[in-house]
Amino acid sequence: MRIVVQRVKEASVSNDSIENKINKGYCLLVGVGKTSTEADIATLAKKILNARLFEDEDGKLNLNLQQIGGEILSISQFTLYADVRKGNRPGFTQSMPPERANELYEKLNATLRSYGINVLTGEFGTDMLVNIANDGPVTIIYESQDGKII
């Protein structure tokens, strides 16, 4: 599982059926690979929630999401597993098939919520307009395989 974490001042997602917006927190772009597991969810959720990516009173990155009362906007993004080694059209054979990918994506969101975080989402498998006001900019890529950070 691969997650791009962007620290945001605000972020929103919309399409014909949803419109969700958060203020200060994280926008997560979540890719579910064909070997992703529930162990990856537990590992990544804990790692992301404990990440100290917000500035303290001295301007140092010492505070985590819970300490600043932040929110999460979680967006599924199968394109994070794009294979661009050959030709000009990316391949997506490393992405998990949609039914199972959605199940793991929803479990990730439920796990994040279980820590008391407000988590809003996009709509899995649809075209969406995502607006991200990246703060910093701070962007970190987290990846787990077999329940271990890689």
Image: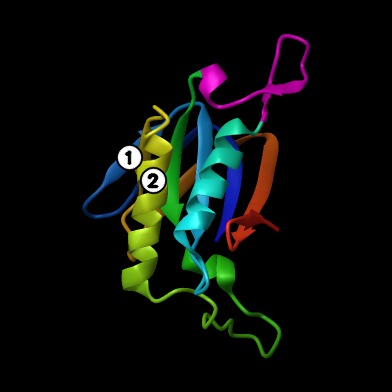
Report which quarter residue 91 is drawn in.
bottom right
Q: Position of residue 28 (x, y in %)?
A: 51, 46
Task: Please say whether residue 127 is visible from this viewpoint.
Answer: no
Badge 1 vs badge 2, beta-carbon distance below 8 Å: no
Residue 17 to residue 61: above or below = below
Q: Around disc 1, counting alpha carbons within 10 Å, would you say few (fewer than 14), some (14 to 19), or many (20 or more)? A: some
- Coordinates of residue 147 in the picture (x, y in percent): 58, 57
Query: Does 129 appear above or below 6?
Result: below
Mark 1 or 2, closer to the camera: 2
Q: Quadrant of residue 82?
A: bottom right
Residue ID at (55%, 18%): 68
The three-letter amino acid code for the residue at tag 2 is Asn
Q: Quadrant of the C terminus?
A: bottom right
Give the alpha-carbon distance from disc 1 to disc 2, as whole Å: 15 Å
Judged from this view, the residue extending furthest toward the left is 17
Residue located beneath label 2 in the image: 109
- In the displayed structure image, the side of residue 141 where residue 2 appears, left or right: left
**Residue 99 forms part of the magenta stretch:** no
Residue at x 48%, y 19% (from the top left corner): 69
Residue lying farthest to the top in this orientation: 57
Residue 54 is covered by the magenta coloring: yes
Q: Say which residue appears at 71% left-offset and 84% top-offset.
A: 85
The residue that appears at 69% across and 37% down in the rendered structure is 137
Q: Residues within 10 Å of mark 2 (few under 14, many from 20)?
A: many
Q: Residue 112: in sight, yes or no?
A: yes
Q: In the rendering, at what x and y percent does residue 32 appear?
A: 49, 65
Front-most of 124 and 47? 47
Image location (x, y in percent) of residue 121: 36, 46
Residue range highlighted in magenta = 52-68
- The type of residue carrying mark 1 is Asn
| Residue picked out by circle 1 | 20
